[in-house]
Image (tube, rainbow, N blue to C red):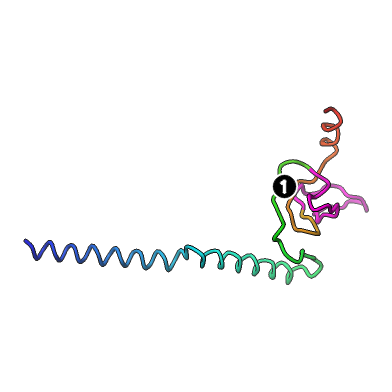
Amino acid sequence: MKIALAVSMSIAVSLTLLFLFLFFKRFKVGVYYIDKYEEAVHDMLNVIAQNDPRYIPPVDYDKAIDLRGTPTHVCPCGSQVWLVKVVFSEYEIASYFLDMECLSCGSLATAPTPIDRSNIEEL
């Protein structure tokens, strides 16, 4: 009986150690995970730059924040220049996406619309 208990305990311990080894190997936790995330973001930006050479990203995204939700036309960094995707029809802007990125700092924001201007004037 004692031998069976010792064998089952050793199997349980070895399976637990194997599980922990595989878990930490697969799901890179801790500081190493953060480094992998930053590396993935850097790789993604390189892919964007390679696919569209006209894209001018900011030097760094350290001061970028996500402002999406409330329409704005001025970034907290002071810039009024945004990267926006638009659709042209007969040499005029026919429609545009509401997601935009600040050219200076890379912050994401929601583009204003004429309806938003009328809502602000009512206040």
Residue 56's image quarter? bottom right
List x then y, in percent, for residue 121: 87, 31
Residue 81's image quarter? bottom right
**Residue placed furthest toward the top:** 122
Secondary element at tag 1: strand
Give the residue type at disc 1.
Answer: Leu
Q: Does residue 103 belong to the magenta stretch?
A: no
List x then y, in percent, for residue 114: 85, 38
Circle 1 crowding by C-alpha within 10 Å: few under 14, some 14–19, many from 20: some
Q: In this view, does 41 lie to the left or right of 14?
A: right
x 8%, y 63%: residue: 2
Q: In this view, does 72 lie to the left or right of 92?
A: left
x 72%, y 57%: residue: 63
**Residue placed furthest toward the left:** 1
Q: Does residue 75 belong to the magenta stretch?
A: yes
Quadrant of the snapshot with the N terminus: bottom left
Q: In this view, does 93 lie to the left or right of 29?
A: right
Q: Is residue 34 left or right of residue 70?
A: left
Residue placed under numbered mark 1 in the picture: 67
Quadrant of the snapshot with the C terminus: top right
**Number of numbered discs on residues:** 1
List x then y, in percent, for residue 83: 81, 56
Residue 101's image quarter? bottom right
Q: Foreground: 10 or 51?
A: 10
x 15%, y 66%: residue: 7
Q: What stretch is highlighted in magenta?
A: 72-100
Position of residue 104 relative to residue 113, above or below, is below
**Residue placed furthest toward the right:** 91
Position of residue 67 relative to residue 23, above or below, is above
